[in-house]
Image (tube, rainbow, N blue to C red):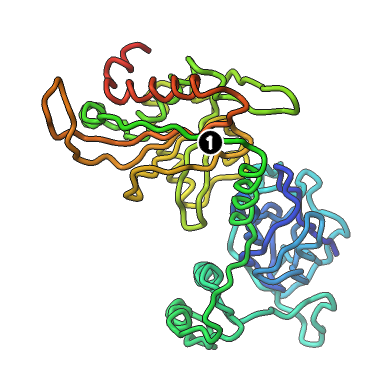
Amino acid sequence: MADFRLPDLGEGLTEAEIVSWLVEVGDTVAVDQPVVEVETAKAVVEVPSPFSGVVTARHGAPGETLSVGSVLLSVGESTFAEPGVVVPAPAGPVDEGSGNVLIGYGTSSAPRRRRRGRVKQQPQEAPPVNAKPASGPPVISPLVRRMAKDNGIDLTVVRGSGPGGVVRRCDVEQAMAKPVATGERRIPLKGLRKTVADKLSASRREIPEATVWVDVDATELMAARAALDGVGLLALFARFAVLGLRRFPELNSRIEGDEIVVLDDVHLGFAAQTERGLVVPVVREANKLTTAELSAALAERTTAAREGRLGPAELTGGTFTVNNYGVFGVDGSAAIINHPEAAILGLGRIIDRPWAVDGQLAIRKITELTLAFDHRVCDGATAGGFLRFVADCVESPIRALADL
């Protein structure tokens, strides 16, 4: 018998919430086979087993939060033999080359498998003493569980319409449509939502921030985006921010005690809205990338974020953040700095507005740029100089890119 404990998930994370089990009691598992899906404060990940054998107990139900080191799964005797034959397994791990690590970091060459085989027990055998009955309502789809969780639906009171009482998506939607007796809905502040809340609170508590903004003629920027095939608007905006940080490096810094630490490389974060909420993927060493490379990196991380494939390391370590909140149809925002960074640059929606050009009134593509900055790292002259530089790049993008 071997107990698999929740491994250290890195980045200082101390707990994780069980999203869904990928194995049942009595299933046969192989080394490095994913056995459970958990959600940390950073991402949703699959956790592989370091043991092979028969699952005798699952310790925890979906929605339950476990601390690192808590027993996650108990694995008993091996079943890699002829059907119907139960062969005792070693008392310890079958493969010493694999440890309690996440998928992608294992040391075993065993292929990852999600198929599950059930062991045929002798009729006179009693079930394992450590086995726990499946808890909660019969829900097969993790998506149904996620929908219920995000909308505050208690699955234990939902009547399933599927075979054997399985709760389906339509059952959760029906429960969502029913009026709440108390007139209120409670959303647990945990996981990613709690991490974001903690960072925002720390930012407001610790950073004396100030905000500057400017209206900019983005007509030439829109023309440049159309001409540069495959390079998106956010990529051009991010490129100008990186160029600005080269001239005003104080904004690419952080406070440590009584010192301002000015950083050499720009690890560029960008706000991305996903089904799990707001996340900030990071493009490392963005200052060393070409415009095309930066555009590709932003697109890849955006897709990965929306699919929930980003790990903790890809969501931390940023030194400066850009935010295109214009996609939400707003002109400006007093954004909160992504602690412990020193500034965040925002881009509003680009709309047709009357604008004076060479003394004549014309209709141009206008947007608003906003910079929120930590007043401890620089004064208004530096912040204003940076914002004006980015604004000039937006108004004359070809000239700015030609200076690289």
Residue 166 % position (x, y): 53, 83
Residue 336 image position (x, y, % from top left): 53, 42
Of residue 31 and residue 140, the one placed in the foreground of this image is 140
User: Which quarter shows the N terminus?
Assistant: bottom right
Question: What residue do we see at 75% from left, 46% from top?
Answer: 98
Question: What residue occupies the far top of the structure in this picture?
Answer: 403
Secondary structure beneath dot 1 equals strand
Q: Is residue 6 above or below residue 175?
A: above
Residue type of the residue flagged with mark 1? Val
Q: Please state which of residues 302 and 387 is positioned toward the viewer in this rendering.
A: 387
Q: Residue at x 50, y 50 (%)?
A: 278
Q: Residue at x 58, y 86 (%)?
A: 157
Horizontal arrangement in the rendering, residue 13 relative to residue 392 (left or right): right
Residue topped by disc 1: 282
In-front residue for pair 231/73: 231
Q: Quadrant of the C terminus?
A: top left
User: Mark 1 packing: few (<14 Cα in 10 Å), some, or many (20+)?
Assistant: many
Q: Is residue 272 above or below residue 298?
A: below
The image quadrant that residue 230 belongs to is top left
- Numbered disc total: 1
Residue 35 drawn at (x, y percent): 66, 61
| Residue 339, position as x, y percentages in the image | 62, 38
The residue at the point 27 percent across, 18 percent down is 398
Q: Is residue 289 above or below residue 216?
A: above
Task: Examine the rendered structure and indicate whether residue 66 appears above or below residue 149.
Answer: above
**Residue 216 sits in quarter:** top left
